[in-house]
Every structure is written in structure tokens, then in C-alpha cells.
Image (spheres, helix red, strand yellow):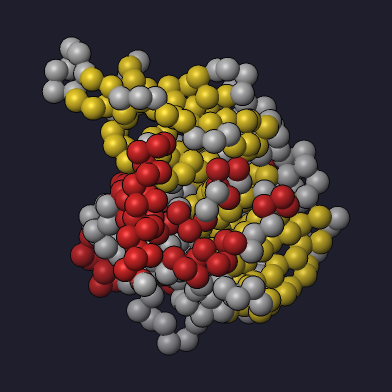
Amino acid sequence: MKKLLLLLSSLLVGMHCFAGGILSGPWVADVREDRLTVVWTTAEPSTAFVELKDGTTLWETFAGRRVFGRLHKVRITGLTPGEVLHYRVGGIPVVDDTNPRDPTFGDPFASPWHSTRTFDSAKGTCRFSVFNDIHMRTEQFAALAGQVDSSATDFLFLNGDIVTAANYTLDSLVHNAIDPLGSLPAGIPLLFARGNHEGRGNNVQLVADVFPNEDPAPFYYSFREGPVACLVLDGGETHTKRSTVYSGAKVYETYLQEQYEWAEKALQESAFREAPVKVCLIHVPMIDPEGKQGFYIQRWLHKRFLPLLNEAGIDLMISADLHEFLFYEPGTMNNAFPILVNDDLRRLDFTYGDGTALIRTFNAKGEQEFEYRFQP
Ligand SMILES: [Fe+2]
């Protein structure tokens, strides 16, 4: 029976590819008030475009020409805050490009229509869902995502270790990190913080391609949605021993110092400074508890980065990595704000409105496990 189901599902996937050419997505990334990037993959190399409801077609290009590939990204700029975009993605498969003067193309294809929206700092409320440390357990990931109220959620945030250290390929990365979200990220912006596992193996640049973010760097950035300003940081590799394998802890320290110098300025930008709520999202928690001396970067962040965030008036840190739920009230870890370490395979829902922030966490069965209210 299982074999029959597998055969049927692979036939369906095959038909889908044949009929549509689109393998995964689209998902909407790199969202700000004035831009967003639509990303998707195709089963075969193809040209790619985003078509807007007003008839505009935006082709995927590089250096002035259309390109063929399987991972597609179209960045749309010049948008306005809260602008709604009705779009679909499509392409034309390349059947044979051995003759570069006259490649052969197949039939054009397109996805169904989707709607998405840019961020808008003038909005009075903000709600988002965070996932972390899924480690390729796609069934539980899909269950957690299936509980998201799509009509009331402003963005989805993957806080690292969605995959596990491996020499992953494009298809396995997208299958594990994007597909379990279903159609949610075609409409709800999807943002990402790198986990230590996404930094291992041979394909860290592929992670940046799947979760594009151009400014100021692939894995650290800030954005604002409604009253909430978010500072996203990349904690890199956590353990001294494993750091050495890839570049050495000293290189990570240089990289973290680069983020520190950028954050000093980003925290002072008016959209951030004046936001009613300031949240730091980072996979590695900035804590230094007893008995965790091997967590070199975690301790480095606690000692070197936390004072800057205290001073900037951060209201909350949402982190991950440890596969256990920890909650540090202000003042318990040299922290001026609560630091929450979300358990693995849990969804954290953050809501802010009317001066009150609400944090709740849920397991894959949809059972609420934690609730905390505070006035930022
Ligand atoms: Fe993890």
C-alpha cells in the first residue's frame, strides 16, 4: 500500500512538473516597504518571469539578458508601503541550448495567481510566526505551519537549523526548508536567520540563494513591519572545534565584529530607533549560563554584543539553537530585555497591538505551551 501511494505521489509530482514546470514555490523574500523578491524553482532549466495583474511582465535577467536555470529570483523594486501585488510566476523551458545562437524552447507555463504585500511601518499592529531547529523533520514542520492563521500573519521567520549540516543540493534544501510551508510564503513574506547547521557543509552560498537578502549582507539585516523593528543577526558556528573546520573561530569573530559595527548604525536609524517595539532575531542566544563553556560564540555574543542591544533599547530577543525552552527575565543574564530560547519543533507566535506584546509557543499538535505578555 505504501509503495502504491509512493508511486501515485511520484506520478502526481511528475504530472505537476510536466503541466506547470514549477517544482517549488513561489515564496516571497527580502521584503521591505519598497521592494520584495519572488523566488521559485523549476523542474527543468527555463527562463523565468513574474507577471503582475496589470499586465507587466518582469523577466529574470542578468547583465541585460534573460537567463536559464532552475532556481529563479525576480526582485521587484519601486514599490510603496503596504502595496498589494497580485502576481504569478512562469517561464519557458529550455529544451536544447547546445547551439547558443538558436536554442530550442518548450511551451510557456505559469503558476496560479497569488497576492502578497510589502511592509508598512504606519500599520498599528504586527503579528509573526517563528520556526527553528526543525532539522529536516518535514512532517512536524508542515503541522506547525498548517496552524498559521494566514489572514492575520504579517510574516514568517525561519530562525535557523531548518536543515541539518549536510552537503545539501538545491532540491533537498527547498524540499526541507520551503515545501513544508505549503502555499503560505507565496503570500506571506518569508524571512530567515542562518543557523549553525546552515553554515556547515559545502553549500552555505546556496542557502543565501534560496533566502535572498541583498542589503547589507545575506544573513544580517534589519526591517520594520508596522510598529515592530527587527534586527536579524547571524551567530555563525557555535562550537570552537567546529569553527576550526570551516574557517576558525577567529574568522567568525571578525564576521561578528563586522555585524557589530553595522548594528551600531542600524539601531540608530530613525525607523528602528522610533519603533514602538524592537526585536532581535538570532539563532544563537546571547547567554552565558554555567556549564556551557564549549559554546564559544554564544559566550562571545553575550559578552561583546549584548551590551550594545541593552543600550539600544531592544525589547525582546528571540533565539534558538539549544533544543530546549529557556526564558530569561530582564536582569538575570546581564540582559535589559527578555531573552527567549525557543524549543526545537515549536512555533512561536508574536503579536503586538494597543501597547501590549504577546508571545505564545505551540507544539506540532497545536497545543499552547507558553504565554507571556509585556508592555515594550
Ligand atoms: Fe539545532
**Quadrant the N terminus occupies:** bottom left
Residue 35 visible, this angle: no
Q: Residue at x 48, y 21 (%)?
A: 58
Residue 72 is left or right of residue 168, and the answer is right
Residue 255 pos. (x, y %): 36, 52
Residue extending farthest bottom: 291
Q: Residue at x 47, y 48 (%)?
A: 220
Residue 213 is left or right of residue 52, and the answer is left
Residue 142 pos. (x, y %): 52, 63
Residue 175 is left or right of residue 168, and the answer is right
Q: Nearer the viewer, residue 231 or 93?
A: 93
Residue 265 pos. (x, y %): 56, 43
Residue extending farthest left: 98
Q: Residue at x 81, y 55 (%)?
A: 353
Residue 352 visible, this angle: yes
Residue 189 pos. (x, y %): 58, 45
Q: Nearer the viewer, residue 113 or 107?
A: 107
Where 325 sits versus 141, above or below?
below
Q: Nearer the viewer, residue 264 or 138?
A: 138
Residue 121 is left or right of residue 65, and the answer is right
Q: Residue at x 20, y 65 (%)?
A: 245
Where 327 sits versus 166, above or below?
below
Q: Report the label total.
A: 0
Residue 246's quadrant in the figure? bottom left
Residue extending farthest top: 101
Residue extending farthest right: 354
**Quadrant the C terminus occupies:** bottom right
Residue 122's quadrant in the figure? top right
